[in-house]
Structure formats: structure tokens, C-alpha cells
Image (cartoon, coloured by chain):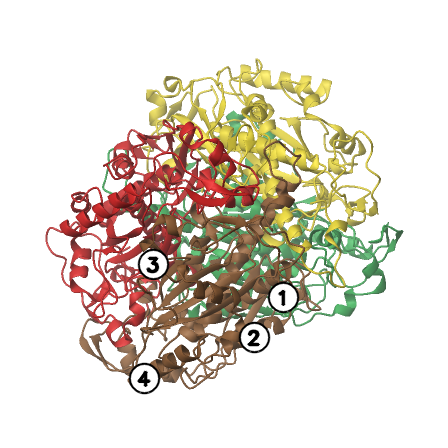
Chain colours: A red, B brown, C yellow, D green
Amino acid sequence: MSTFGTHFRVTTYGESHCLSVGCIVDGCPPGMALTEADIQPQMTRRRPGQSAITTPRNEKDRVEIQSGTEFGITLGTPIGMRVMNENQRKQDYGNQTMDLYPRPSHADWTYLEKYGVKASSGGGRSSARETIAGRVAAGAIAEKYLRQAYGVEIVAFTTSIGNEFLFPPSPTHPTCATNPEYLKLIENITRAKVDEFLPVRCPDEGVTRRMEDLIADYKKKEDSIGGTVTCVVRNCPSGLGEPCFDKLEATLAHAMLSIPATKGFEIGSGFGGCQVPGSVHNDAFIKAPAIPAGTTEKPSVPRPRLTTKTNNSGGIQGGISNGAPIYFTVAFKPPATIGQAQQTATYDTEEGVLEAKGRHDPCVVPRAVPIVEAMAALVIMDAVLAQQSRAAARSLLPPLKGIVPVRETSGV
Amino acid sequence: MSTFGTHFRVTTYGESHCLSVGCIVDGCPPGMALTEADIQPQMTRRRPGQSAITTPRNEKDRVEIQSGTEFGITLGTPIGMRVMNENQRKQDYGNQTMDLYPRPSHADWTYLEKYGVKASSGGGRSSARETIAGRVAAGAIAEKYLRQAYGVEIVAFTTSIGNEFLFPPSPTHPTCATNPEYLKLIENITRAKVDEFLPVRCPDEGVTRRMEDLIADYKKKEDSIGGTVTCVVRNCPSGLGEPCFDKLEATLAHAMLSIPATKGFEIGSGFGGCQVPGSVHNDAFIKAPAIPAGTTEKPSVPRPRLTTKTNNSGGIQGGISNGAPIYFTVAFKPPATIGQAQQTATYDTEEGVLEAKGRHDPCVVPRAVPIVEAMAALVIMDAVLAQQSRAAARSLLPPLKGIVPVRETSGV
Amino acid sequence: MSTFGTHFRVTTYGESHCLSVGCIVDGCPPGMALTEADIQPQMTRRRPGQSAITTPRNEKDRVEIQSGTEFGITLGTPIGMRVMNENQRKQDYGNQTMDLYPRPSHADWTYLEKYGVKASSGGGRSSARETIAGRVAAGAIAEKYLRQAYGVEIVAFTTSIGNEFLFPPSPTHPTCATNPEYLKLIENITRAKVDEFLPVRCPDEGVTRRMEDLIADYKKKEDSIGGTVTCVVRNCPSGLGEPCFDKLEATLAHAMLSIPATKGFEIGSGFGGCQVPGSVHNDAFIKAPAIPAGTTEKPSVPRPRLTTKTNNSGGIQGGISNGAPIYFTVAFKPPATIGQAQQTATYDTEEGVLEAKGRHDPCVVPRAVPIVEAMAALVIMDAVLAQQSRAAARSLLPPLKGIVPVRETSGV
Amino acid sequence: MSTFGTHFRVTTYGESHCLSVGCIVDGCPPGMALTEADIQPQMTRRRPGQSAITTPRNEKDRVEIQSGTEFGITLGTPIGMRVMNENQRKQDYGNQTMDLYPRPSHADWTYLEKYGVKASSGGGRSSARETIAGRVAAGAIAEKYLRQAYGVEIVAFTTSIGNEFLFPPSPTHPTCATNPEYLKLIENITRAKVDEFLPVRCPDEGVTRRMEDLIADYKKKEDSIGGTVTCVVRNCPSGLGEPCFDKLEATLAHAMLSIPATKGFEIGSGFGGCQVPGSVHNDAFIKAPAIPAGTTEKPSVPRPRLTTKTNNSGGIQGGISNGAPIYFTVAFKPPATIGQAQQTATYDTEEGVLEAKGRHDPCVVPRAVPIVEAMAALVIMDAVLAQQSRAAARSLLPPLKGIVPVRETSGV
């Protein structure tokens, strides 16, 4: 089903070439200031055409709120949102050849196997376009709540393109998690800083330049290349995530692997952490420092008494957030649509050559940055509402021996 | 919530030290032969005490079916299952020191933050023990159905321990996915073969020996080490997975990251695939070969007319299975409980030294193998029932122009 | 959450006075012919302004499909639908008095208690208007599938207004269920026949006339009156409904009581059936007759071998459909908005007199008829998809002793 | 699926003749005192064998908590519960005749149509027995929380058996809702008072006696009879229930119609309310009185500033609770299993006579009382957790014009 979340529930609709794409956001708290102006900036950050290395299609991606607010305040009822498909250009995609061939590593063939209906644009629903309203717009609403209620900050950025890495793995640091430079970046990076490094969004002058060159190179070859996006969530309350199946890293992984073109997810020390001994990997506890002045963190929300000296866990232990920064990395494959001729087979199993037309990104990684942020916001928001419910329910019970008062536990 | 799946829904209960652990499996098709004998083998494969390098606790893990079958046949009603906690040994865990300290990188602290109740065994629900009934037992039921209905085979095995790799990444093959040796293994490995390489379960004589030594080494140092498990699903019908949020790789990632101690997931070419150009990464289509003789595949189930020459996609394209082998890798961190003394802080923020008692695994990877298989079975089963429903619904509609008859599409 | 159904899932948005109302229908089988022309007729049947006794507001209620179809065929992806709020007339509702007073027996007060936000139209989300897209449009899609796949017919009609009854309860028949005249009507009534009795939609010339007079009388008094709608579902496959919590009558009751202004639901013999002894109430089995010629029933779908002599059960036994007509009755209260002055209290607890302005129905029963049909279609559709999944899953298992082959059981 | 609720989620398993019946309760707030002693009383109230007019089977129904509590305090994790099937007596049910015939108006036939598997006890899952653990035990937990947190009181009682009514409908009062005597009863009745009227549980000396005689009479005739149960929920917080599909009356109706043998549900004025003009039916607002001394209501929980003069709405307006007593009535049909010979047909469509053996209730109404209470508790609990989440989320937002502070709205 095209639905994400339990308490903050997003339901989306829309294919590449239909009338509009949109979503319904159910569960937004009432009484929050909200207009299109809160949503549009992330929509725009995702837009193609931001520089020479991305696709020149000029989608306007203007979101209209249909319901759920009045006089700029959320009512608590479902928020309908819609984005017109203004610039469809079916002719760029549709041609004799592409009607005969399922595009390799695209969704044309699997959609046909699944549904038995051949849509004019192949796997239309799998297109990156549906992500706009459903993910970015809904994520912007979630993010606004999290920021207002807890001072949560969510920032994503490019960490590799092809074999260019912001922090290349090394024998000393098989995982960045053990690298103090990396942790410092995680703790300080802002969205504004990331956008200083447009178009690639890798926050290091030299690396971002090399990445840009690499992408330009693949573009020239009518080829494509992948990369990784790292995302950090700061000031996240502790206590988020459900034991067993809905651990916080599990729902984050679910969210990230639901983004088109993703092939991997790692939290905290990740794959590299498998090589680190437990004695190094364990995050020892220390007394939490006082909240520094000038923080965006909300002083009204209590923070845990303990924090960890290191953060190999990535802010999540036993599936539950501990209040430290949550960070994770997502792998994006090279885009499947390339200009080069490809030897492949038709729907009717005949061998032949497919040459794709149209203008396409040689690399989706930079534009994926706001989508990763949006999905992170949706996951955190859903977990926050779940935990708020639990804490509120607990707060009404009579005190018992062996029970810690609600005020003294999590920040929710 | 402690529930996994929509159509084949597993709900679990149980902490480390309660009366029993168990689960309810709802949605199992009626009319399938099923007794405890179908479930026990995977339970036993997960048991500790299988060799010198795993923990000597002697849990019996005997599953009893409470309901949902009669005379060895499933009724279609919920299947209740229970495993007694026979060997609790609270005294091994509970001691003065451990009551004062939340164990580093364990769930003690986050559980307290979440629930405000200090359970005698810390984050009891996060223990690996709850996985038994809820995951392995339920997974065994799912697997039996998938095998009987489609000839599905699910096999997991150890691919790395610390820095010992079955297929070390190389400049030629930044991802195993492009390595023909790896693909051959993926296509042929069996569960029986994997268990020839006990206790480590890495199907290569030399590598498994080095891994065993590595684990023994960490054990001696009262330390611990992580590693990776790779899993393949063969003969999986095409058409599984839902567009947008519940792509098949997304639900697989969710399932895998819900296993305790996991830190990463990658499907197909994974993280290494980010370094491969699109022109190499794309899986060109070819006419599917006739099903070879002697296969476990069910001849009654139609297979897709097309398959792919390579399989960088890992059997999933646009979030939907294409009939090729699905394979993915899961990262497990070093176990948090180690014998070495650790400098850390008490619940009351006092600094001090924690020395853990009790007998614990220096490496969970070999025992995680059947758990990964079980979770894969739950994901595939849920997706199969969703797709069967769609195909059945479609088959009753009158034929239309532009629609492929159900018989000629997916294997569901 | 504003979502109905598990397999055929409808999510709605919209208040009385927002930009548009709409819904997303997820789970519609692919390959079905579908355009706005399939949906509009039921939308129009629900429209006010159909006669002198209903409200003269001229809502156009034109539905636009946003996604999920191409060239008039469903793709299997979510179907977005939207209806503009063309004729809002805020000024009719908003005035000094109504801003001060929560309207008695309306949702103004409870919405404020729930959300803490005072929307300009009071309990906007509770308005009958949101039912349009979410219920009637989605129901029309469900109904088309059910008709095409199984020949299902769903017909609702007015059975009482105030104390005017189509079948008044009597000592002989404390429930209509035992009255052969009633059963004959249930088996033969069509939607076309019902609409011959506009505006009241009670299919008896004399009774419908008396009802019309009664409503006109209440209108003149600036008062309002309630009544009941009975609905029958014919040719429904057997085997629908889930044991325990989601019995078919339970989900029907849920659906019906979710319609604004409803106060009661009864299935089969209903409340009157409590007075009938078991020896009379039990529905004895008989061999099912051959399907008569000229039926709309699909000959391709098998029907149960047994049927019942009587039908006090209302087509559902043990929570599961048995193939006989399903019929139930829904109670609608008198509309809360009346022209008469009402002694009540302001939001600030001051006593005073409220006189409502605006044009309102003295009786919602006739217009509720298509809404009851729509909700019935949503329930049956969801249950059909659940059962199709089960039957399809079962059909792939090897035959066992004690198991009835799929072909010989239900019609799904 | 055998699951009820979203936030307080109950999943059940068990048929009549399996090893045990049980349930998993997920979402119980942590830190609540809970042992079997909190649950057993309602289990026992439901037990048969309480008097000469109920069945003499001696089920012990002893519930054992498997998980989710430690030292008598809830941990917040899933609570597993189990009740052994101690007294199965298969031989009483199984015999030659009953193997040939599906019992009229029982679930034998529909279960076979649904599942295709013939269980030894027919529609085993539909038996009243599964209600024990899943409903009554889970309901007892919900009820304890509601009582501790809000002082909620839930009391059900018998209001009719056959044609004997506690409040017979009359021209003056077509619905009890307009009868002040009835409202007084609703406001004062306690569970202890109800049990003074055992075995029938109708709280009027004369009426309960006539009902007892009526049941005895049907028993003698080897026949059976139905009746109604009315239930009231007092001190329920305002603001419960979700707009659109999950109105509070809709989920109550769902819950009640999921109880075996139910045929109808009405809330507040119900079916009789259709005959009352809007001018009488509307519940005018008045300033809420101060909470009287000696109430069980929690002084810490704020109550709405307004209440209603009358209560035709039954405590719910626009689908949302308003703080007034919620009351509703449920219809139970005569039990299907009777001693009399019945002319019917075999599974193979042969006509014949079925004579049921075994000892069965002539009337389930008195024993249904605690089940109705349990289901009401589950519905209210789920709605409370949903609303607590919303209120908690809202309380962290900055104040805005047009928004009522959380403290001043609902009691949640």
C-alpha cells in the first residue's frame, strides 16, 4: 500500500504522466502554523535544473494545500496536498523503440509482471516524481513540528560519488564512526552549509569539486554513476523506536530503501563497524553536559542525564534513540536511464539494441539529499507521536516503587 | 508494535526472563501440513551451544503449537506458538554492579528512558531470545508454504567476520555483484552445504577456518567481533513488492535491521555498486532459459519470459521482484556484552568500572544465519499473499485491450 | 485515522469549507475499465436539490480522477480523486450568533474539545460533505469491480421515516426477517425501482407518499425527523469475513456507524430477532437451486452447494457470508440543524438562544441511500480481496486428506 | 486478522478444542500494577455454570500472564496471556450425526466455505470460548488503566430477554433515551448492583424474575431465546473518537458486532430515536456542574466546561465523546444450538434430521454482560491513547491566536 507511518500517516498517489501527484497527511498535530511557504523550500531543493550537471526539465513543483488548515493553522484533520504535472513531455519518452523494450534496470518489466497493464511510461509509479508530494511535502510538515517542539535538526549531504569519498575508509577507520573529524562534522553541519556546495552538496571544497568533475565526465560519456548520502538527526528525543520489529533503525532503513535507486543503508558504524572489536565499539556512558547556550534545542524539553563518550551506535541502542545524534548513510546506484546504446531484449524476448532518448540525470545523489531528509523526518515524527502517547499514558498512573517518574526520563 | 507483516502477520511477546516467549501467526493459508517437526530444525540451528565458540547456555527452545492446526493440518486460523523459558539463570546476570550500571551499547539505558520501568534484566525485550518464537518459528511456517507453493529456497551464510571476507572488495569488483564466482555461489549454495562449515557457516574451507580462529582470538581476549551474513532467495515469483513505500528491498531492509545487533543492509550491488557506472550496472534483458531438470522449482508455476544477463539489481527492480535470485547482505556489530572491564557511568551519572559476568557469544554472526533466513521468509510470504490477492482479483475481470492475461505475467 | 479498509483502502481528506475534498483509493485491481462516468451517477444520486423536500444548495460534485488510470483502464496504482468545493457560501453559516454557540447535537463542541482549534464552520470534518469523494466515489469503484467479477448487486432504500414504516413491527413478525413479503422485496428490489420513488426512495406508493408528507410537515415546523435505510447485497460470494474481530457484520456495522447522523445498525433479524425462539430463528440448510436464467450473477463463479430455507441470519453466519442475500438496516437520527430557536449555552457557558440560519435538510434519510450502498461496497470489496488472497494461497498447496479443493468451496 | 485496536492492540488465538486459547496485548502503558488477580474476576463472571439456567460445563478459565510484567508491574512490552483448554469433552460434541450435518445458523458451513478444512468442532474459531482470553482478559487490563487514570466506570446489564423488557418501548418513549428513569439508571448502576440480580443480571427484581422464568421455559422446551445488553461508560474523557471512518460509535459498533451471536447495536437514542423530532432530540448545552463529592472520578483530570441537558446523543457527538455517559445496547440472537430435532441438509446436500447433543445455554445474554464490558474497555482504551498522543503533541507547540490551550480542553 502507498502509505507510510502509523501515527503520522502519509498516503500518496500519482504516476509520471497523470494529471497530478499528491498525498494526504493524517495525524498532524492541531494548532501548528502551516502554509505552503513551509513546504515549498524543500520541494525546490529537490527540483531538477539547479545546475549544468542535473537534468534541465523545468518542473515547477508548486504544492497546493487542499484541506486540513484554516487561516494558516492546522486543524488536526487530514492535510490534502497536490502538485500539478505541468511539464509532462510525453513525446520525449514515448517512441517506437521504447514501446518495444523494457528499459534495463528500470521498473518497466517488473511493473508489467506485477500489474499486467502496460502504462505509457513504463513503471510510472516508480518514477522519482511521485516522491515530490508524498515524501518531500509531508516530510516538510513533520520537520516543522519536530523543530518547533524539540528543536530537531535534520541535515543530509553527499558523502561519496563513484569512488570519490568525503571520508575514504581506511585501516585505522574502517568506519567513519570512529573518526573524530567525522563526528565533528555530524555535530555541526547545517543545511545552509550544505547548499554552499551546490550542485553536489558535499561539504568540502576539494572533494565536491572532484565529484562535480566526475559526474560531468559520466555525463559526457552518456553514462551514469552512483554515490552515498549521509544524514544526521540532532536533538532527537530519547526513547523513540519500538522493540522487536519496529526498532528505530529498522523503520529508518525501510524509509530509505523505499527511495527509488537506493541499494543500501547503514546506521552508526555500519558495515565498517563489523571490523571494530566490541571493546572499541561499545559506547561508554558519561554524564550529559549542560545544554550549551545558543543551541536550537528547546530548553523546555528535558534531555537524558547520560550520554555516550563515543557514538558508534549512531544514536540508537536496542532499537531506541538515546538522545545522541542519529546518523546513517544511504547508497544510490547509478541511474538506469543512460544515453548509450544497450544490447537487451524486447518484451517479446527478441534481442536488439535500445537507445534511450530524453534528458536524464547522470547522478541522482545531490537531488536525493532533501528526499533523505524528508523520509528521516517522517520516521522520527511517527516515532515521536508513538512515544508521546506512551509517556502521556504513563503520566496519569499512580506512582509505584521501581518506576521512574515521566519527568525524569525521556525528552518526549 | 510487536507485529510484522500485513497479510502474514506475526505478533510476538516475551522478554529474557519471563515465563515463556511466543507468537501468534495470523494469515497462514489453510490446508497445509504443519507440525512442530517443520519448525524445530531452524529453532535448533539458532541454538547456542553448538560449538566451543558459542555460548554454552543450554536453552532447549522447544516450540509447542497451541492452536491453528488440527491433525497436523493448518485450519487457516491464527497459529499460537510458545517456547518455555526453561533455563533462566537470573543469578548469572543479576549482581550488584550490573544493577548500578547500564551496560554500554546495550539497551538498558534506552529501555529505561522509553518505559521508565527498570526490568531486572535491563532491556529484556531487546534480547536475542525473543527472536526465537517470533521470528524463527514464524519464518519456518512461511518458508514451508513458499517451498511447497513455489519451490522457493532461502539460504543464508557468513560472508565476513571482522576483516576476514569470503569475497574481499577489490578495485575490479568494488561490489561482489559483478563477480561471476559470487553469482555462481548465490545460485547454488544450499543450507546443507552451509552447515558443513559449522560453527562459522562460511562456505569456504580456508576462510571459515580463519574466521573461526579470529573469533576464538576475540573470545580469549574477552572481547567481541562483528561480521556479515549474506542471504539468497531463489525461485521467488516475480511481481512481489509494492510501489512507493513498501518496495521489496524496503521491507527486507526493515526486517533485517529489526534483528538485534544489525547495523547495515545492502541489496544486490549495494554500497559497492555506487562505484560502478550505469553502463555496467544495468542488467540487460535476455530470454529466460527453460527450467532445468532436477530443479526444486514448481513446474506448475509460470516463470517470467525474460530474465537478466547480470544481476546487479539483486532480483528486484523498481521495488518489485523480477524472478532472478534476490540476495542481500546484513551487517552485525560486535556483541556489546564483553568480559573486559569497561570505564563507564552508573544510572546516577557516577563514573566507574563495569565488569560483565555471564557467558556470552564473542560473535553472533553464525547463529544469526537462521534468523536472517526467517525474516526473509516472512517478508517474501507477506509479499506473495499481497500479490496473489492482486492477481486473483485481476483474473476475474473481463479481458481488455492493452492488458496482459494473468497467466502470461507473474508466477504468483 | 481517515482510512477505511485493509486490502481496498480508502483515505479521505476535506472539510466543509476547504479548497477541495478528495480521496485516494489504494488496492483497486489493475486492468479494469474505469472513468469518471462510472463514478458520477452515485455522486449525483447523493446530491442535494433533487426535490422540494431536500436542501436547495446546488453542489455540483463533479469528481476528477487524478491518477491510477490510463486510457480508461486502472493501472493497479493508487487512484487519486478530487471534488472542488465550488459553492461554499460561508456567509450562510457564519454569523455572530453561531460563532458564540456550539450547535446542539452537532460536532462543534466535541471538535473543539478534541483539537483545540475553532474552525470557521465548527466540526467541519464531520460534515456530510466529506462523504462525497471518500465514500461514494470510492464505493462506486468497489461496486464496479464486484459487479464485473461476481455480479454483486447492492441496493438500499428507505424503510422508515419517523413512525411511518414500510414493514411495521408486529406481534407476528417482531422482525421483518420472518416476513415472506419482506424477503421477496429483498430478493428483487433494484436501484432503478428505488429511484422511481423519489424523493423519499421508499419502494411502496402509499408509504412513500405518507413519508413525503411527514417530512414536508417537519420542514414547515422548522424541525427535523429521522428514519431508517435498509440495504441488501445479492450474489455476494460465500466465505467473506474474518473470524473473531473482523466478522463481516462487525465491519459492516463499523462502516455504517461511521456515516454521519447514524444511531443504530442491525443485521438480518436484528433487534426484533431477540424475541424469536431459536427453533424458528435457525436457518435450516437446503440444497441450493440451480441459478435461474436471466440473472446478473456470473455463471463462471461457483456458488455454494447449500443455501438456507429462511434467512434470519441475514446472509452471514459465524461472521462469514454464506452466499444468501446480506441485508441490514441503519438508523438515522433527525438532523441537528433546525430553524427553530434553541435554548442552550455559549462556548463560554453563558445561557442563551440560538437560531440557526442557512438551508438544511429536514431529513437526511433519502440522500443517505447511496452512501449506505457505497459503504457496503467498500466492506464487501475489502473482504473479497482478503478471501481471494486466502483461496489463491490455498490453491497452490498439494492436496491433503480432509481438505476440500478450492474449486468446490466458496465463490471467491 | 484476529487483531483489535491500533494503539492498544489485542491479538488472539485459539479454537474450541486446541491446546490453549490466549492473546497478546500490545500497547499497555508501562508502570501499572498488574497481576492475574486484576483479570480473573471478569473471567469468572463470564464463566458458565453460575446457576441452573446456564450450561453446567465447568471451565476453569484460569489466566496466566506469560510476559510483559515483572514483580507485578507492567513493563510496557507485550503482555502474553494464556488459558488452558482444560475440559474439552470432544466426545460430547463429536458424533456420527454432527459429522454429517452443518449445524443450522452455526458457523460450520461458512467455515468450510471459507477455509476448505473441516475442523472437528465445526467453526471452532467462532466459538464463544475464544472470547475469554482475547476479549475479557485484555479488556480487564484496559479497564484497570482507564479506572486508574480517569476514574472510568463501565457497567453492562441485561435489558431484555425475548419480549420481556426492562424499559418497554412506548408511544411516549419510542426510545429509552428520552425516559428520565432510564437516564437515572444509566448514571448510577454499578457492577456490584448488577450481580445482585444473578443469574439474569437485569437490575429490577420483578423483571429479572420474569426473564429467569422465560429462559427456564425455553430450556424446558429444548429451545433458546435472545435478548439485549445495555452498557454505560461513565467518566469517559471528552475528545475520543476519530473523524470520518473511526467515529467512536463506529468502533463501538465494530467491537460489539464482533461478539458471537450479536445482531444489532444502537447508541444513545438508537432506532427509537428515528421517531423523535430534532427539536426534542437535540441535546442543549448547559454549564457543567461541579464534580460531586464521593465520586470515583479523578479530580486531577479536567472535565469539559459544558455538558448537555439531555443525552440523546449517548455521550458522542460528531463521532467524538463529549464527556457525558456513553451508553449503547447490543442485540443477541437466540443460541443456534438447541436440543430439538431440526429438519435440515447434510454437507452433501441430502435432506435429514439433526438432533444436537451436549449441554448448551438456552440464552447467552447474562454471560455476555462481561464480554460487552470488555469490548467497550478495549474501544475506549484505544481511543484514549490516540487522543493522549494528539494532546501531548499539541502541548509542545508554541501558543497561537485562535487555539485553545490543551489544559482547557479535553480531559485527556
Q: Residues within 10 Å of mark 4 (few under 14, many from 20)?
A: some
Horizontal side, residue B69 vs residue B332: left or right? right
Horizontal side, residue D120 vs residue B134: left or right? right
Q: Are marks 4 and 2 on the same chain?
A: yes
Question: To which residue does mark 1 refer?
Answer: B67
Q: Are marks 3 and 1 on the same chain?
A: yes
Whole-angstrom CA distance, mark 2 to mark 1, is 20 Å
Query: What SS does tag 3 mark?
Result: helix
Query: What SS does tag 4 mark?
Result: helix
Amino acid of disc 1: Ser
Frontmost of labels 4 and 3 is: 3
Q: Picture coordinates of residue C4 (x, y %)?
A: 52, 41
Q: Residues within 10 Å of mark 3 (few under 14, many from 20)?
A: many
Q: Quadrant of residue D108?
A: bottom right
Question: To which residue does mark 2 refer?
Answer: B41
Q: Are marks 3 and 1 in contact (CB under 8 Å)?
A: no
Q: Say if residue D89 shows up in the picture.
A: yes
Please, is residue C199 above or below residue A261 in the view? Answer: above
**Chain label for disc 2:** B
Q: Residue at x 70, y 69 (%)?
A: D88
Question: To which residue does mark 3 refer?
Answer: B272
Q: Residues within 10 Å of mark 1 (few under 14, many from 20)?
A: many
Query: What SS does tag 1 mark?
Result: loop
Q: Are marks 4 and 3 on the same chain?
A: yes
Whole-angstrom CA distance, mark 1 to mark 4, is 46 Å
Asked whether D73 or A45 is in front, the reply is: A45
Please, is residue D55 above or below residue C303 in the view? Answer: below
Question: To which residue does mark 4 refer?
Answer: B217
Whole-angstrom CA distance, mark 2 to mark 3, is 35 Å
Nearer-N-terminus badge (1/4): 1
